[in-house]
């Protein structure tokens, strides 16, 4: 399929989704999955439909499939982290969003940063930052290990 036609179909799918025509959007993204099963975009489109319907578990599954197909997709990782947060898995979501880092994919790093700044994620992002900033502990000597094991 030509790039212009593909972009038009993706835009129509998102247009349908934004205008709450979820069945039509899902139908279109389903067809794109059949045509492009090894690309992330149709799974992202289907995931966004499920996210709009507050089906966070279904959206997480679709974003995970997008990551299986394209493991370095920062956008799929960011949307997966958002769904995990919406499901109440704040620590998991914060870890997933932290892995997005400073991605070059449009919107991925800014979305991750916005969700990592939520109060629900604060304890987990502080712990991750502290772990990154803390110097590595020096290994214990044999005498220190034996003393610690002996309770002295």
Image (cartoon, rainbow, N blue to C red):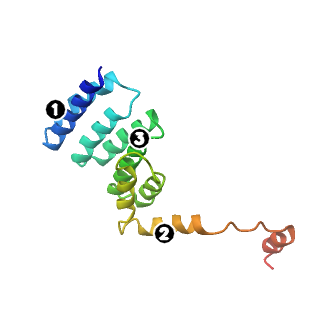
The CA distance from mark 3 to mark 2 is 26 Å
The numbered disc on residue 54 is none
Whether tag 1 and tag 3 are in contact, CB under 8 A, the answer is no
> Which image quarter is the N terminus in?
top left
**Between residues 151 and 62, which one lies in front from this camera angle?**
62
> Which residue corresponds to mark 2?
126
> Which residue corresponds to mark 1?
24
- Is 51 positioned to the left or the right of 149 in the image? left
Label 2, secondary structure: give it: helix
**Between residues 6 and 25, which one lies in front from this camera angle?**
6
The numbered disc on residue 64 is 3
Q: Residue 99 at what x, y percent from top left? A: 48, 52
Check the image and report above or below for 83 versus 26: below
Q: Residue 152 at what x, y percent from top left? A: 81, 80
Label 1, secondary structure: give it: helix
Residue visible at 37% across and 41% down in the picture? 63
């Amino acid at each position: 399929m030509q790039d212009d036609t593909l972009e038009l179909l993706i835009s129509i799918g998102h247009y349908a989704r934004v205008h709450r025509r979820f069945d039509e959007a899902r139908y279109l993204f389903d067809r794109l999955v059949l045509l492009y099963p090894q690309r992330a975009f149709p799974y992202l489109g289907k995931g966004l439909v499920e996210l709009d319907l507050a089906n966070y578990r279904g959206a997480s599954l679709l974003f995970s499939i997008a990551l299986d197909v394209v493991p370095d997709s920062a956008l799929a990782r960011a949307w997966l982290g958002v769904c995990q947060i919406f499901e109440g898995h704040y620590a998991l979501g914060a870890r997933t969003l932290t892995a997005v880092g400073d991605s070059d994919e449009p919107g991925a790093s800014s979305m991750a940063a916005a969700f990592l700044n939520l109060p629900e994620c604060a304890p987990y992002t502080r712990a991750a930052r502290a772990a990154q900033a803390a110097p590595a502990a020096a290994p214990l000597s044999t005498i220190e290990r034996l003393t610690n094991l002996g309770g002295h």
